[in-house]
Image: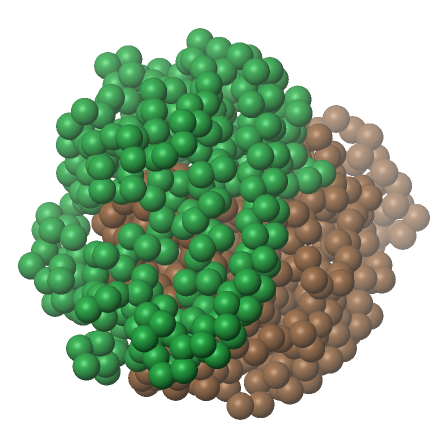
Chain colours: A brown, B green
């Protein structure tokens, strides 16, 4: 083989593009054990050369049957289950369920409990988005942001742990309020057994650090040429398609739809918070990334305001020892870090629900994969999939 | 002994009803099981029970319950209020009348009570207005969809259509409410293999209820379009052509409830293994883990229905040992 003259080499490569190569259809199986599938997702892709012709996602490897299990558990026990749906933001999963039960039972949690719930939900949102900020650039080949994001995420998880006792599965909400610290005896004692000492100050400090890390990520990722090349204009989801597939959360807002349940639903006292809902313009992978980055900042803002405005008072409303929820049906949804998370609860007056339908965000967010991957390039497959920010536990329930 | 509504000494049942009645919409109904048996059944003629004083008798039966639902709210805060403020163990409410300084305390309590009542009234009025608004929205949507019934309880609008009209109704509704949220089903069965049976299960009309939730993206409004599917003929028109996102939801409902969504191009199992038999979310489908091994929770403090220790108390918010002792004292 002769040495390649650079000019000839260029010539050859140009020739290779212009020649019609025969690229017979090939089935490419990705997963279920694959690092970029965030769990156990299997994709059966039909590819024609570098083009994806069609993709069939195969899910259910993590199906745990929570809807069936909910039919044999008391309301208090279901809280422990719903934690595990989207384990990256366990706390946020509890909120709509607990609020649905409270709605049916006619129990209004005290304001302090609501604020604590809000602070922890936003902490969970930050933790979840920081996972995205670490995993997404990683999938695109950038390893450094992972170090920065996970460091701050650890800080946030420690805060959640200091209040709830659990890093991932807090199981902290109770119907009518939040869990008093273990060992509390009478009502009086329980009121004093509240947030751990120094929590508010630590959270404030942590939020400053979180905002700092956003700047780091900005520097490392946002303007990065490689990231631009991989994400800008890739995996574009128009708003009308997003709505028809039930996309929610950052994925929907990246397509320019101003839909944030924190602004619409009163499950938590967000109406007294001042924050913005970041929107994307093009609905591509880059916008989905940018929206989430900005949401971290906004979540930090909400937490700081919530700490400032944290009311005093009890953590628990009066709730009967044996909670029977009167006959009724409701659907309550809230803004999970991944999107709309809701529970359709049918009570028949007993201690356990007759039916619980879990609407999880990632399930709908993922269902757009066949549409969005059709005609995409194989190297973009991972970039597009990662940008949807799903968790398989949230898909399979 | 007198029991104030939220007095924990009262134990289980009686207490339960109280906070409940605030929102349930039918304070007395809970005891009248039979009448309310068909609560979730929207179309059925569930006329208000005898003990409801007012003859609201709405043409759409749910609408009438809205005002009734909010009224107990007004009382609630001022029942609870004396309960929280004064000393812990006194049965509140009785105290000012029989206490040492009735006049002063009563006056104070009255003043406070009035203020609270006023605030509560405002709140109740706002709630009522919101409920009215919701009911109006539901009625209007029902009319537009050619629905056979609707309700707007607990902030959830549900509009019921016939199965034949399902496709058209969802199309019309999604014109107003463009965001597709979810589609699923409920199995209304007389006999259940797991869990508790429905209220008044003996007289229940056995059916599957298919629900499709749509919502607006500019405000909080949203609605559930629903229809009944007879058990002996369990098929549904698919809405995948309208809302492609419904495809997975329909596949899930199909495998879990054994419904046939005609028109859905993909009828493969979604979650379940290909050769899985049965439809797990049907009420007749047993929960195998429970069959093999009894619920370990039976030895726990939290009594499960149908087990021996139902009365052992429940680890709700205050579920610890000391609390129980306090209650007895």
Q: Taking A298 as reference, is B264 above or below it?
A: above
Residue appearing at x 92%, y 48% in the figure? A7
Q: Nearer the viewer, residue B140 or A59?
A: B140
Give the total number of marks visible in the rendering: 0
Q: Name the quarter where the N terminus of chain B is drawn.
A: bottom left
Farthest bottom residue in view: A197
Q: Taking A263 as reference, is A162 above or below it?
A: below
Q: Nearer the viewer, residue B322 or A375?
A: B322
Where does the image place residue B22, in percent across and percent down from the top left?
A: 41, 50
Residue appearing at x 41%, y 82% in the figure? B101
Farthest top residue in view: B164
Q: Is residue B36 left or right of residue A247?
A: left
Q: Taking B14 as reference, is B230 above or below it?
A: above
Where does the image place residue B62, in percent across and percent down from the top left?
A: 44, 28
Q: Is residue A300 left or right of residue B328?
A: right
Q: Name the quarter where the C terminus of chain B is drawn.
A: bottom left
- Res. A235 visible in picture: no
Q: Taking B214 as reference, is B301 above or below it?
A: below
Q: Nearer the viewer, residue B247 or B144?
A: B144
Where does the image place residue B214, in percent across and percent down from the top left?
A: 57, 31
Q: Is residue B37 left or right of residue A140?
A: left
Q: Nearer the viewer, residue A312 or A329?
A: A312
Farthest right residue in view: A7
- Res. B79 visible in picture: yes
Where does the image place residue A374, in percent across and percent down from the top left?
A: 64, 31
Q: Is residue A289 left or right of residue B315?
A: right
Residue appearing at x 13%, y 62% in the figure? B311
């Amino acid at each position: 083989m002769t040495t390649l003259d650079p000019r000839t080499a260029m010539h050859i490569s140009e020739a290779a593009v212009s020649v019609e190569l025969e690229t017979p259809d090939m089935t490419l199986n990705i997963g279920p054990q694959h690092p970029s599938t965030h769990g156990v997702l299997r994709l059966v892709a039909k590819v024609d050369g570098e083009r994806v012709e069609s993709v069939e996602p195969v899910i259910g490897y993590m199906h745990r049957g929570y809807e069936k299990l909910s039919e044999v558990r008391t309301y208090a026990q279901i809280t422990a289950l719903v934690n595990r749906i989207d384990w990256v933001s366990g706390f946020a999963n509890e909120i709509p369920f607990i609020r649905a039960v409270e709605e049916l039972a006619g129990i209004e949690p005290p304001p302090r409990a609501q604020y604590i719930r809000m602070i922890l939900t936003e902490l969970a949102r930050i933790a979840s988005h920081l996972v995205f900020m670490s995993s997404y650039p990683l999938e695109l080949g950038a390893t450094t942001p992972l170090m920065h994001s996970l460091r701050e995420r650890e800080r946030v998880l420690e805060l959640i742990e200091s209040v709830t006792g659990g890093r991932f599965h807090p199981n902290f909400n109770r119907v009518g309020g939040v869990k008093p610290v273990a060992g509390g005896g009478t009502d009086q004692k329980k009121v004093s057994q509240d947030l751990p000492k120094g929590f508010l100050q630590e959270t404030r400090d942590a939020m400053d650090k979180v905002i700092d890390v956003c700047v780091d990520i900005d520097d490392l990722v946002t303007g990065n040429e490689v990231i631009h090349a991989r994400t800008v204009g890739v995996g574009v989801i128009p708003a009308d398609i997003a709505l028809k597939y039930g996309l929610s959360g950052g994925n929907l807002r990246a397509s320019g739809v101003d839909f944030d349940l924190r602004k619409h639903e009163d499950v938590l006292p967000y109406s007294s918070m001042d924050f913005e809902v970041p929107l994307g313009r093009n609905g591509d992978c880059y916008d989905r990334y940018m929206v989430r980055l900005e949401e971290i900042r906004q979540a930090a803002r909400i937490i700081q305001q919530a700490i400032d405005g944290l009311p005093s008072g009890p953590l628990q409303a009066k709730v009967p020892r044996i909670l029977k929820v009167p006959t009724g049906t409701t659907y309550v949804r809230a803004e999970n870090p991944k999107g709309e998370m809701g529970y359709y609860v049918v009570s028949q007056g007993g201690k356990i629900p007759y039916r619980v339908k879990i609407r999880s965000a990632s399930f709908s967010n993922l269902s757009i994969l066949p549409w969005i991957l059709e005609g995409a390039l194989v190297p973009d497959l991972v970039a597009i999939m990662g940008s949807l920010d799903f968790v398989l536990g949230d898909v399979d329930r | 002994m007198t029991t104030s509504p939220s007095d924990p000494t009262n134990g289980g049942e009686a207490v339960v009803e109280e906070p409940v009645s605030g929102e349930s919409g039918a304070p007395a109904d809970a005891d009248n099981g039979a009448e309310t048996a068909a609560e979730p059944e929207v179309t059925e003629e569930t006329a208000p029970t005898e003990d409801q004083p007012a003859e609201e008798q709405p043409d759409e039966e749910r609408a009438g319950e809205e005002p009734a639902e909010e009224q107990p709210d007004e009382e609630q805060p001022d029942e609870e209020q004396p309960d929280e403020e004064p000393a812990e163990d006194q049965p509140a409410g009785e105290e000012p009348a029989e206490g040492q300084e009735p006049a002063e305390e009563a006056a104070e309590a009255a003043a406070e009570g009035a203020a609270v009542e006023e605030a509560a009234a405002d709140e109740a009025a706002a709630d009522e207005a919101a409920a009215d608004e919701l009911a109006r929205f539901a009625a209007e949507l029902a009319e537009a969809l050619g629905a056979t019934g609707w309700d707007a309880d607990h902030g959830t609008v549900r509009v019921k259509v016939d199965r034949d009209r399902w496709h058209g109704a969802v199309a019309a509704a999604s014109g107003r409410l463009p965001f597709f949220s979810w589609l699923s089903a409920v199995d209304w069965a007389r006999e259940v293999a797991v869990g508790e049976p429905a209220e008044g299960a003996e007289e229940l009309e056995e059916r599957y209820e298919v629900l499709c939730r749509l919502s607006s993206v500019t405000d909080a409004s949203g609605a559930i379009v629903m229809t009944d599917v007879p058990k002996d003929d369990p098929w549904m028109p698919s809405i995948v052509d309208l809302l492609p996102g419904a495809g997975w939801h329909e596949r899930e409902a199909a495998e879990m409830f054994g419904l046939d969504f005609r028109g859905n191009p993909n009828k493969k199992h979604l979650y379940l293994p290909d050769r899985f038999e049965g439809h797990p979310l049907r009420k007749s489908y047993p929960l195998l883990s429970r069959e093999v091994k009894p619920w370990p929770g039976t030895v726990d403090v939290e009594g499960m229905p149908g087990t021996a220790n139902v009365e052992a108390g429940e680890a709700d918010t205050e579920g610890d040992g000391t609390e129980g002792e306090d209650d007895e004292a």
